[in-house]
Amino acid sequence: MNKTLTLLCLLVVAGATAQQPLFIPQNVKKAFDNGTRSMDGKPGNKYWQNFGRYNISVTTMPPAKGVKGTETITYINNSPNTLTRLTIKLIVNIHSPGTARQGNASADYLTTGIHIDKYTENGTEKPFGDPHGSTNFGVRLNKGVPSGDSVKLTFDWHYDLSEESGREGKLDSTSFFLGYFYPRVAVMDDVNGWDRMNFTDAQEFYNDFNDYEVSVTVPKNFLVWGTGDLLNANEVLQTPYADKFKKSLTSDEVINVVTQKDLDTKNITTQNTTNTWKWKATNVSDMAYCISDHYVWDAASVVVDKKTGRRSSTQAAFNDKAVNFHNQVKHIQHSLDWYSNNWPGVPYPFPKSTIIEGFADMEYPMMANDSRQDDDVMQRFIAEHEVGHSYFPFYMGINEHRYGFMDEGWTTAFENMIGIVDLGKDRANTFFKQFRVNGWAMNPTDETQVPIITPVNILSGPAMGHNEYGKPALAYLGLKDMLGDDQFRKCLHGFMDRWHGKHPIPWDMFNSFSDINGKDLSWYWNNWFFTSNYMDVAADKVEQTKTGYSITVKNIGGFAIPLDIVMEYADGTTETLHQTAAMWEKNQQLVTIDIRTTKKISYLKLDGGIYVDANEKDNSWGTSKTKAAAISNIDLSKYMGTYSSKQIPLKITFSKDDNKLIAEPSGQDKVTLESTGKDTFSYVAVGAVFEFDTTKNEMTLKQGGGTFLFTKDK
């Protein structure tokens, strides 16, 4: 009787847990009550967002690092309230001494910030005030702006580019990157009101969708690349180069618009003292530009919408000696084609995509500022990730300040999907674990177990990075696995159709997926986004039954992860049974899986794949004859010795203990490695992979996205 009662209680608790509604903050509830957002995930019938028309003229004269600009902003108030104040973003003030930031700032990073030389409201000049280095500044309007009306602002401003380049600044003495270079009106939305959050150089951005016309004036022989359509190529380029650029817009093959030999002639642009490059873009969230007199220029295009034949331009600008940047246009073409036709499977929405050689590995609408890589696989990886951001946050207007998991998380999930195509599943997943998962999965702490839903603006360090990238990516990939590709695509496209060009928040995403799916997914969203769970399952019991075996799996860490049950039978055969995260819907602590078989299981292992288990020691049952035989057949002596690298000041000595390879980095403890493939070993705890080439006496260490070559000492 007591056992029966206990079982019934567990079932009731499990059922209640599965139906637990999502936590909704009070400001989000208010948006639902006001009708600006709907509980089914759609924009409400009273949804609104504001809009601006920006006309910007900016001048810079390298090698002088000053930037001068003028702009006119027509800001339209679509909110239901009269505006009496505006919030202005001055993001380059991040370089001002004393500005709040999440990291240290060197002397080369610091400048005096942005200086507003003149400010007018509806034609009337007025004092702007002193932002005191803030990236966020409020101004009071002379006259309120009623709903449906607009206000016209003008700014004259100047600032110096920082010597130390990051997301923007000087790339070298005559190559500049202009990012966040102009004053802008902050977002005011229906959930949080004005975005008064200061930029701290850690979290990213939140911008309205605006229309832009931008003129960039530079000295002759300087080229300019940027967001939007170049309107006057024939005016700023000599005819041969303008013709090659025009040809590239319909070419599948890469065209070298400007080569190093061309640059040496110093006769590429129109030979005026200065040239003004004119650009235009509509319904985009930002503009960014690169300027150089010594970057080569490659370009081509790719069909991004096979139904209409619409093409997008693909361009790259870089130092000629950046070897793998010569492949960059091909990388962009591949990215745009794959993203448009696979995942997310929405035709690339913009007319171009340009990647310039910089330092930041940072995305902007139609632009990326990417670092030079010695490994072309890594060069392509970075390109794919930054181009992938075209959807989240630039097609979907994500508030990256607060909800980085809605842009970085989705892009990281797409990164894994395209990586499988590029590298094969095993290699891509190994790389994904090393770069996105192992660092937190193997080390569950108070910092790595902060719920994903926590607004990222109040996070820093490991918690911020893990919550934006790896953890949500696994949640999205697990959802895809659970729903199946067709249903997942239906939900993803439905969410994107509802909210592209708008500002979705997490609850719009959660509710859209549930609504379109036709079944409440709150249990899954709760499990992954609202808890302090981690990944750790255990094979608790394996019992024979009349029809085969009963396997009880404990979910020690709590995350609803998919897994494979890998079985070895006594007759030497093997079988793998995949379980999606749906197995945890009714009871997220314990499940029993029935396996129908007439064979005897001698060994069983729970394999989470990219869902890295914090403690793999309790994931198996029985003894693996296959693994034991494979390990005993490895000749470990051929790997032994001390290896050194010219890339990093580290020596690693390899020895063996019985049938195990031991690694001892200089000044560190010995660690036991696991054989993970031919001539390949790993140390999972730190995401390190050791690949040996015994014919060359070389070993390659891959860790944290880096690749380091070691040579065996003689």
Image (cartoon, rainbow, N blue to C red):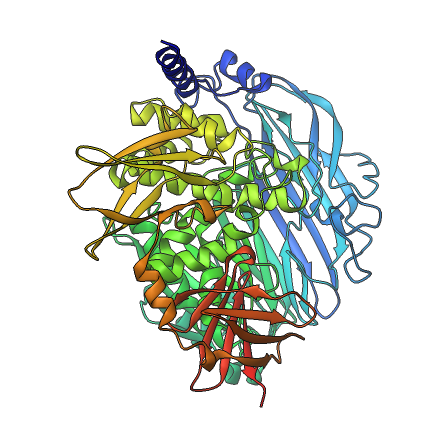
**Does 348 sit left or right of 547 as displayed?**
right
Is 528 on the left-hand or right-hand side of 26?
A: left
- Name the foreground residue: 431 vs 145: 431
Give the x, y percent position of residue 461: 67, 46
Would residue 204 be visible to someone looking at this image? Answer: no
Could you tell me which quadrant the N terminus lies in? Answer: top left
What percent of the width, then of the height, locates residue 124? 75, 33
Above or below: residue 311 compared with residue 357: above
Residue 44, above or below 207: above
- Residue 76's spot in the image, x, y percent? 57, 29
Q: How many marks?
A: 0
Q: Considering the image in quadrants, where does the C terminus appear?
A: bottom right
Looking at the image, the residue that sits furthest to the bottom is 714
Instruction: Classify residue 588 by image quadrant.
Output: top left
Q: Which of 134 and 383 is in front in this view?
A: 383
Q: 610 or 159: which is nearer to us? A: 610
Q: Position of residue 371 (x, y in %)?
A: 57, 65
Q: Residue at x 40, y 72 (%)?
A: 243
Picture residue at 35% right of the left edge, 43% below the top = 563
- Comparing 269 with 203, the one in front is 203
Note whether residue 187 is visible.
yes
Quadrant of res 15: top left
Q: Is residue 417 above or below residue 452?
A: below
Residue 337: which quarter of the image? bottom left
Is 518 left, or right, of 413 in this rendering?
Answer: left
